[in-house]
Image: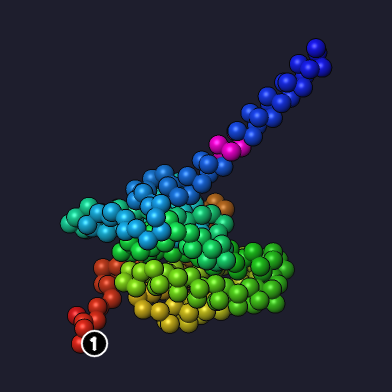
Amino acid sequence: MVKKSLWNTIYFLSVCSFLFLALGCAWGIRDILQPSGSESVKASSKPNETLPVPAGGLLLGLGDSLTRGIGDPGGQGYFGIVKTQLTLREKEPMSSVNLAVSGLTSDELRRQIKQPHIQNLLKNAKWIVMTIGSNDLFQSSGSLKKIDVAAAEKSRLQYQQNLTDILTEIRTCNPKATVYLFGIYNPFGDLPEANLASRLVTAWNNTISQTAVQFDRVIVIPTFDLFAMDPGKYLYSDHFHPNHLGYERMVERLWQVIQDPPKEETTDGQTK
């Protein structure tokens, strides 16, 4: 009887552990698809169904921890700040969804945006803001003390293809939304090997610009100079992500171009 009771107890604990892990996974997915602090447009179960979106439009965030807002003690990041500014500017109600995931690479983003419910959000977006590429670069280049230039170059070429695929997918889903794509900065500007790291970042930023120019309504927001002179003032304690002041600097540059949107072509080929 004691042995049977012991096995029953082990079985019960195993079931409880499985349920706990399953629940944790579900909450993790929920946090990605409906992150706290962002208004959310409920995704449709039908891939081609048009979602109800407020008349003011939908702000959609894609990419990595910079769009997620990591490093800002208030949790806003540049996405939260610009959402507030758009809300104040627009005369009609608007909504926002932040799909960014900390640590995301370009290959993971390329696969993420192929999901039907995310494509529904892409179709309905008016503004798309995105940071992607820093994880590709700094994960592939090795430690700062021993940068692997060859590995970084191989990763850059793959990143170029991934970014092309990402922008192609976005444009296929939504030809009209303006995409604001942030460039990459060097968070190690005040550390040894800073010059080599800066050269790599410059090469990757050139790749971003050369890729983006092939697509309509894709605007590159440069960030390389924002943290170059005084990184300690604008970076979080991890010496990688911006702090609140750093994100405010990103928003200043983003807001300049949001307030001056690309001109639309009329049916006769003229701009208006």
Task: Determine if the magenta segment contains residue 170.
Answer: no
Majority secondary structure of the magenta segment? helix
Tell me: residue 233, above or below residue 107. above
Identify the residue under disc 1. Answer: 269
**Amino acid type for the residue under numbered disc 1:** Gly
* Residue 82 lies in quadrant: bottom left
**Of 82 and 267, the residue lying toward us:** 267
Q: Name the quadrant of the N terminus.
A: top right
- Residue depicted at 74% across the width and 24% down the height: 10
Q: Position of residue 196 (x, y in %)?
A: 63, 75
Image quarter of the C terminus: bottom left
Residue stretch in magenta: 20-24
The spot of residue 128 in percent (x, y) is 37, 64
Image coloring type: rainbow
| 42 over 116 or under it: above or below | above
**Whole-percent x, y for residue 12 in the image:** 68, 24
